[in-house]
């Protein structure tokens, strides 16, 4: 038990902090306890502390003055150990553990975090408590890494929840430098998949001590033999990624995060008295080392996360690499440049805070190894160092994998522009993208011509999330189709290659392999899925450009029964042009309201993207042509009126349901001569050049 003196009375949920002053109130295991009244004549406190010391060992913290003779009676007890404040700081440091939860998508990271929070007494208002972004809750995915703190057996655990999708790999990369350990969550049925390899490689590269958690072992298809097989696969993956002997000596736990239990031995249903996460929490304390940081050195912290608060301005989050920080301390921001270290800004700590469970609490001080957030500087961003003014050494930043695709964001110049949005100008679009790049290091923004901006990222999903956030904020913009970013080394053209893992029913294997062959994919391995008769798993490598727009095709080909996972692998030799992957489109040549009469005659030409009553303009795409060429059509043509009537002329028009695309589907569908028009209310596809004559001239222009 660690007891900390406080100068005031705090609520019972106050987090213990070491202070130098002594008073009648002390914090005992998080609760404020009054030692009694000061007896002026006897010059001693009424020794109620002895009651606590009789039950559990007590560590009494104070300065040398606090431990003077007239208080000796307090520590003259076998259960009470006196230490100084300086010793207490070291003790607190040794009770810290910083751990990231990493996994492939949908293997149970966020559910595991919910159960750990509940186990440690946090109030969880809803499932996926760590997902604070509205899009995360809507889509059931983790987009950004988050940090929270929980207490277990007098230890403080800083837990980092990370995304599982390959597109958000930058979120994993930027937080691995904040932690000393990682819980690798693997679905016991599926085994290690593409993103498992990616996140594990990052964890091993930075020397993290791993804990393997085989999740979902309560499923009927999962047996002890299957768990042993998955454990062997994971061990081989560790070895292939160059894990050290220390990292290869990882503990293995079996869990059902959904049911809220973990065990060091295989079981399908643990006894009711051990149906909890205590064994996993104990494994973290016993296996993950305390932070490697000096508490005596001057303060230094690498900024790993940044957010904005309406009142406090920039809030910078990171792990304290050295020293201690207090409210009011002077600090400055620095960064490395080609010519040395540059000072960015001077300031002082205005607020210091931590997230504990699902709550944000204000703290007065924090020491080396802890993960905290602070306010007080207005310029430093992710990758910069915040330090004591004496320090002019910038901490090394985490190396991120390069972006693989880019899209161009520009002002919406369609005839329907300005009807839905409030942020319409190129300047506002540029400011928003710049702000995004400051908080998301995996995105690069390069200004272009005519108020356009090239946005580079990891994949369609990542850029699609950015576009969706912008349209919800009231932006209107035009977006180009994704463009793969090539490299040239020694005169050879290189392109980003991705590792693809696909699981489908046996009857769909041929169709999937045929579609991927047109996209320059190459099969690495193929075999049955353990525990799932009639299912086949394919492992392939495929150029990133070949996978643009493939997810919707895959879903259609497998009738929604297939699973596809992808992760960036490397840059490799260009594999040549893709085969034919899309038909032509139906292009509007009329401006006005779309009519049912016009669409009735267009249904035979292909698949429609619009419904009667929608607005149309010249150059807008209203459907997919049944042939490989584009076709100009008039979707606004009205029924001719006359004073003659005949039988059957006034029947209702029955149209097939149109194909209404989501933003991600539109990003994957558009061709190089097309754009996506994005507004808060609508997503439209259009030709880059709205005039038909100009489009014809551009088609006939000789290619470079």
Image: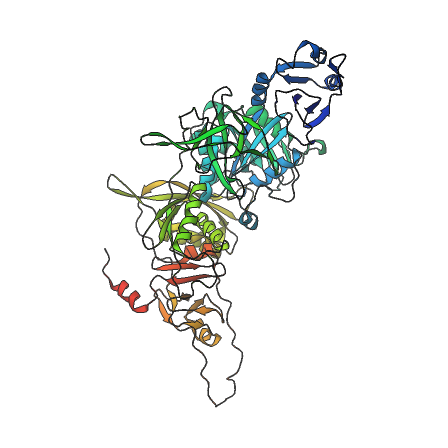
Residue farthest front in this picture: 41
Residue 517 percent location from the top left of the image: 37, 51
- Left or right of 23: which side holds 509? left
Q: Which of the 4 image quadrants contains residue 73?
A: top right
Picture mark count:
0
Residue 48 percent location from the top left of the image: 76, 19
Residue located at (62% from left, 15% from top) = 83
Nearest to the observer: residue 25 or residue 614: 25
Quadrant where the C terminus lies? bottom left
Residue farthest top in this picture: 69
Any part of residue 223 in sight:
yes
Residue 368 percent location from the top left of the image: 52, 24
Reply above or below: 446 against 196: below
- Left or right of 489: which side holds 244? right
Quadrant where the N terminus lies? top right
Any part of residue 196 in sight:
no
């Amino acid at each position: 038990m660690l007891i900390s003196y406080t100068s005031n009375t705090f609520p019972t949920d106050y987090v213990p902090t070491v202070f130098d002053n002594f008073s009648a109130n002390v914090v005992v295991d998080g609760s404020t306890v009054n030692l009694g009244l000061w007896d002026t004549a006897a010059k001693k406190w009424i020794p109620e502390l002895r009651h606590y010391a009789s039950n559990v060992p007590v560590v009494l913290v104070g300065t040398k003055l606090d431990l003077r003779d007239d208080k000796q009676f307090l520590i003259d007890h076998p259960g009470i150990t006196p230490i100084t404040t300086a010793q207490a700081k070291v003790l607190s440091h040794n009770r810290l553990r910083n751990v990231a939860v990493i996994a492939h998508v949908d293997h149970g990271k966020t559910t595991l975090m919910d159960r750990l929070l509940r186990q440690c007494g946090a109030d969880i208002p809803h499932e996926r408590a760590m997902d604070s972004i509205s899009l995360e809750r809507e889509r059931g995915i983790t987009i950004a890494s988050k940090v929270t703190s929980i207490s277990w057996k007098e230890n403080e655990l800083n837990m980092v929840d990370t995304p599982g999708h390959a597109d958000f790999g930058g979120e994993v990369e930027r937080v691995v430098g904040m932690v000393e350990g990682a819980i690798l969550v693997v679905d016991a049925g599926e085994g290690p998949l593409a993103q498992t390899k990616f996140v594990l490689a990052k964890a091993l590269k930075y020397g993290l001590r791993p804990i393997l958690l085989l999740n979902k072992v309560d499923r009927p298809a999962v047996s002890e033999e299957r768990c042993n097989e998955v454990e062997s696969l994971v061990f081989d993956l560790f070895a292939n990624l160059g894990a050290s002997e220390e990292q290869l000596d990882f503990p293995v736990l079996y869990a059902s995060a959904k049911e809220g239990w973990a065990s060091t031995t295989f079981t399908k249903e643990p006894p009711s008295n051990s149906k909890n996460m205590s064994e996993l929490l104990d494994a973290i304390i016993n296996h993950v080392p305390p932070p490697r940081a000096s508490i005596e050195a001057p303060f230094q912290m690498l900024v790993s996360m940044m957010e904005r608060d309406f009142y406090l301005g920039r809030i910078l989050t990171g792990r304290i690499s050295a020293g201690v920080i207090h409210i009011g301390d002077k600090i400055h921001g620095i960064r490395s440049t080609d010519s040395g270290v540059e000072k960015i800004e001077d300031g002082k700590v205005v607020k210091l805070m931590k997230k504990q469970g699902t709550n944000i609490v204000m703290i007065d001080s924090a020491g080396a190894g802890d993960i905290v957030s602070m306010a007080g500087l207005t310029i430093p961003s992710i990758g910069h160092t915040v330090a004591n003014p004496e320090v002019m050494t910038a901490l090394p930043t985490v190396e991120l994998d390069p972006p693989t695709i880019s899209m161009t964001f520009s002002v919406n110049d369609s005839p329907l522009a300005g009807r839905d949005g409030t942020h319409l100008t190129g300047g506002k679009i540029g400011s928003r993208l710049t702000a995004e790049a400051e908080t998301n290091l995996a995105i690069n923004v390069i200004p272009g011509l005519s108020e356009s901006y090239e946005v580079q990222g990891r994949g369609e999903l990542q850029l699609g999330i950015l576009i969706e956030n912008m349209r919800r904020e009231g932006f209107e913009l035009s977006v180009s189709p994704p463009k793969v970013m090539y490299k040239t080394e020694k005169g050879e053209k290189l392109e980003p290659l991705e590792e693809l893992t696909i699981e489908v029913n046996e009857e769909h294997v041929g169709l999937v392999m045929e579609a991927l062959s047109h996209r320059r994919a190459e099969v690495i391995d193929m075999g049955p899925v353990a525990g799932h008769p009639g299912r086949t798993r394919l492992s392939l490598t495929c150029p990133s450009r070949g996978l643009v727009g493939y997810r919707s095709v895959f879903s259609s080909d497998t009738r929604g029964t297939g699973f596809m996972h992808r992760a960036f692998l490397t840059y490799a030799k260009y594999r040549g042009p893709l085969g034919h992957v899309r038909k032509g489109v139906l292009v509007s040549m009329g401006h006005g309201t779309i009519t049912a009469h016009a669409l009735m005659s267009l249904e035979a030409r292909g698949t429609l993207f619009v419904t009667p009553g929608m607005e149309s303009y010249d150059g807008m795409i209203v459907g997919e042509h049944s042939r490989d060429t584009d076709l100009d059509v008039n979707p606004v043509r009205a029924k001719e009126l006359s004073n003659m009537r005949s039988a059957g002329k006034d029947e209702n028009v029955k149209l097939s349901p149109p194909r209404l695309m989501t933003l991600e589907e539109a990003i994957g569908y558009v061709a190089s001569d097309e754009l996506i028009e994005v507004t808060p209310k609508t997503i439209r596809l259009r030709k880059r050049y709205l005039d038909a004559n100009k489009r014809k001239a551009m088609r006939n222009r000789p290619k470079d």
